[in-house]
């Protein structure tokens, strides 16, 4: 199912809230959003989400209800996919009214299952020789522990919960970091411009 909603603006310190029943869905993908927003699926806790991000996997748990929240003073329009199959963005991702129309051939590069050691990380430069990365996909194969995603300065900017995947549209340096005491298995895939 693809659906567009308008998430109401906050009223004072109370965020605007919208609840959508995603019963039977295992994958949620934000196709476009006019701004970042917060979301919570059954039992996940609230986390930030924006255009181009994907949560869940076809063999994962049902998402249940999704609670969208907006702490800003402006309404947010969100178009999303929810379903039981993987979702691949086939149109440019747009956020804040901007979009990328780069039309170029791409190729994928993956390393299979990677072990991210305890208290260490796997860093990906954003380049394959002279080819820039378009998209970065990480799947946390662990059943309980999250992975952190760090930027090129080493700052944590996101987390990948156990048993989920996330997609990032960037050619910048990304480090998949395991801050846990045990190693975590993950898959890392990158899509590069040819």
Image (tube, helix red, strand yellow):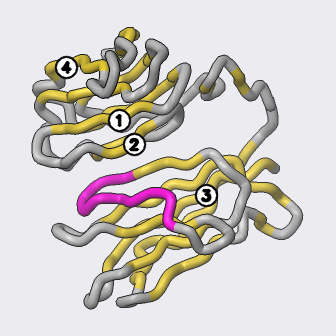
Q: Which region shows up in magenta?
A: 156-165
The answer to whether 153 appears left or right of 76 in the picture is right
Residue under the point 62% across and 45% down: 169
Residue under the point 14% across and 46% down: 61
Dots 2 and 4: beta carbons under 8 Å?
A: no
Where does residue 158 sit, x and y in percent of width and height? 45, 57
Q: Is residue 82 magenta?
A: no
Dots 3 and 1: beta carbons under 8 Å?
A: no
For label 4, the crowd category at 10 Å Cα-Cα, with few meaning under 14, some 14 to 19 and many 20 or more, is some
Q: Nearer the viewer, mark 2 or mark 3?
A: 2
Mark 3 vs mark 4: which is more N-terminal? 4
- The residue beneath circle 1 is 38
Marker disc for residue 190: 3
The answer, for residue 82, to whether it is visible in the render is no
Dots 2 and 1: beta carbons under 8 Å?
A: yes
Where does residue 104 sit, x and y in percent of width and height? 81, 36
Q: Nearer the viewer, mark 3 or mark 4?
A: 4
Mark 3 vs mark 1: which is more N-terminal? 1
Mark-to-mark CA distance, 3 and 4: 33 Å
Q: Mark 1: which secondary structure?
A: strand
Displayed quadrant of residue 185: bottom left
Displayed quadrant of residue 56: top left
Mark-to-mark CA distance, 2 and 1: 4 Å
Where does residue 21 sit, x and y in percent of width and height? 14, 20
Mark 2 vs mark 1: which is more N-terminal? 1
Which quadrant holds the N terminus? top left
Mark 2 vs mark 4: which is more N-terminal? 4
Residue under the point 61% across and 58% down: 190
- The residue beneath circle 4 is 19
């Amino acid at each position: 199912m693809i659906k567009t909603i308008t998430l109401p603006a906050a009223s004072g310190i109370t965020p605007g809230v919208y609840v959508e029943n995603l019963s039977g869905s295992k994958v949620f993908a934000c196709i476009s959003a006019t701004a970042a927003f917060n979301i919570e699926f059954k039992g996940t806790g609230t986390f930030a989400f924006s255009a181009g991000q994907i949560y869940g996997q076809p063999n994962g748990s049902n998402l249940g209800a999704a609670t969208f929240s907006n702490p800003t003073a402006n309404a947010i329009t969100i178009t999303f996919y929810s379903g039981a199959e993987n979702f691949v963005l086939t149109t440019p991702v747009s956020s804040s009214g901007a979009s990328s129309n780069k039309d170029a051939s791409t190729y994928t590069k993956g390393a299979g299952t990677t072990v991210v050691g305890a208290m260490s990380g796997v860093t990906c430069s954003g380049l394959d020789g002279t080819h820039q990365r378009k998209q970065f996909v990480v799947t946390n194969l662990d059943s309980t522990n999250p992975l952190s995603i760090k930027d090129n300065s080493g700052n944590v900017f996101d987390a990948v919960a156990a048993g989920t995947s996330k997609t990032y549209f960037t050619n910048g340096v990304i480090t998949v970091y395991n801050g846990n005491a045990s190693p975590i298995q993950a898959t890392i895939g990158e899509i590069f411009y040819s």
